[in-house]
Amino acid sequence: MADAEVDPIGRPGKKLNVVGMVGLIVFYLIIFFAGILSHKVLRRKSRKDIRKMQVESKTEDMMLAGRDINYFVGVFTMTATWVGGGYINGTAESVLENGLVWTLAPVGYSIAMFLGGLFFAEKMRKRKFVTMLDPLQEKYGKPLGALFYIPAFSGEILWSASILAALGTSLRVICGIDDTTSIIASAAIAMTYTLFGGLYSVAFTDVFQLICIFFGLIFAIPFMVNNPNVEIPLRSSNLTMFMDQEQSYSRFIGKLEKEDAGVWVDQATMLMLGGIPWQAYFQRVLSARDVSVAKTLSFAAAPGCFAAAIPPVVIGLIAMNTDWPGTDYGENLIPEDYKLAVPLTLLYLTPPAVAFIGLGAVSAAVMSSTDSSILGVSTLFTRNVFVNVFYQKATDKFTVWFLRGTVFVNTVIAMIIAIFVKTVYGLYLICSDLVYILLFPHLYGMIAGFSVALILRVLSGEPVLKYNALLKFPGYVEPDQSDGSYGRQRFPFRNLIVILNFLITLSVTYLSKQLFAKYPDLQKYDILEGVRDQKTEKREGLQNEKEGEQFL
């Protein structure tokens, strides 16, 4: 579909679908009012006194829903947070482009949530932290800990942009709405109910949205399979056609070349470990009613996320085995169309009513992740940067309104990126890339490793952001001027940078502590409060441990 980007309604002759528009508006209004009224459902009067013991202010209540999320709502909101439009459209796009063997995000993120529940959920919830940066600021001081907001912000904003871009392409193809309008409208609705209800609204709407996601896509697949333009080998007695389909399945599985093994390992590790340090994840862990709920959310959501990837994987397989010239689409898919796999199969292989149900599923997926990501990154900035570093005397009322203002600004930033960056799966990978390289090691580290890792990652280039590498690792593929493609790394450079990050972080931490311990007079130069007296650390650690025991 070579003219997809210039034709806002998908194909010449396609008109704006008024019926679909009306249905979509009704669907959006349901989610909007559910989000607005959600706090009345979740903030039950019978648990009012318990919530007051759990949170210290109205701001914290808005950020963590009174730390009163139970098993049912918690599992839904944790799963829906990860299963966004980028997850659905990006998975189908990746299957079409590179095959199943390269579609690593579903497995990687599922493992990440399991590891998060195994190693971090209990410790974070027991200590009653509000954000994932709290332990870093407690360990290294507030100014230094606030530095780690940069990769967290980058990852969350790119995540939001990827899922908004996914919805934009879907609405353009099915309803004839241009990308910009659909991105702005969807983001505005998610932002509005988030402004009113905070995590209460986000968690409650996630329940409804996740049901829509599973039902909408699963409901549409049988109609796609039974479309006469879709050929399934077991349904055909023609040997030639069967062999052609076997080739399609070979393409579906994909191929891992020996020289690309390093890239595969690099991406797999990045997704498994880079999927842990996300505020959207820890916000649900920290909002859980108790430690048991916090761990269960991670363990239960991991298989849920994996299961949610099955429908888009099947849709990718169906798209490979479709005679597209025989449909109203009129021609074969080209690589530029792969990001449109989900909306195209819905539009051309299912009846109109089914297509709009599937579109509702994609729309629900987008808002369920957008609201979570925007609230998470806004919470980090409000608490860990603005209040902890710049304005520690801020009143609770002022902080609440500052949080709402931050939600608005971050939503606008995500919308702008979604409008101008076209690839869905590319954004999806970059957000994990940044979080993995820059933030994951600093669950244990400090500024030196962060700075070196940031410089190395920027110099390594990024085709999705359209710039070539200045630092070329072994096996680097040079850009091809003939087709305008950008260069790419085949060496597992992400893992190398992370290892260097760890080594520099640990060595600098050790050396600086030894230096300040041996020469106490130098502590006056510790302007970032990165090195602290061991007796003070021990005393504060015992105090926090005692508070955790009293809380439980």
Image (spheres, rainbow, N blue to C red):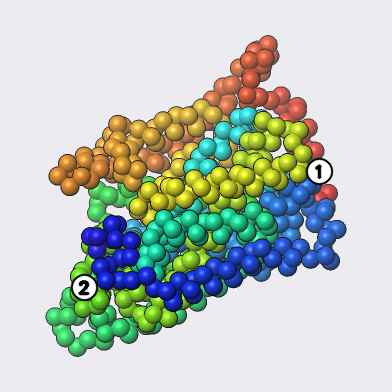
Q: Which residue is mark 2?
A: 330
Query: Given the image, on which type of amino acid does mark 1 rest?
Result: Lys
| Residue 2 seen from this side | yes
For the point 53% across and 42% down, which residue is it?
153
| Residue 100 seen from this side | no
**Looking at the image, residue 421 lies above or below residue 93:** above
In terms of depth relative to the viewer, which is nearer, 126 or 76?
76
In terms of depth relative to the viewer, which is nearer, 541 or 290?
290
Image coordinates for residue 291, horizontal then vertical, percent? 71, 57
In terms of depth relative to the viewer, which is nearer, 515 or 420?
420
Image coordinates for residue 50, horizontal then vertical, percent? 83, 58
Element carrying mark 1: helix
**Looking at the image, residue 22 lies above or below residue 92:** below
Structural crowding at the residue carrying mark 2, measured as other residues with C-alpha within 10 Å and reported as few (<14), some (14–19) or many (≥20)? few
Image coordinates for residue 353, horizontal then vertical, percent? 42, 81
Image coordinates for residue 93, horizontal then vertical, percent? 34, 62
Q: Which residue is mark 1?
A: 546
Would you say 325 lies left or right of 15 here? left
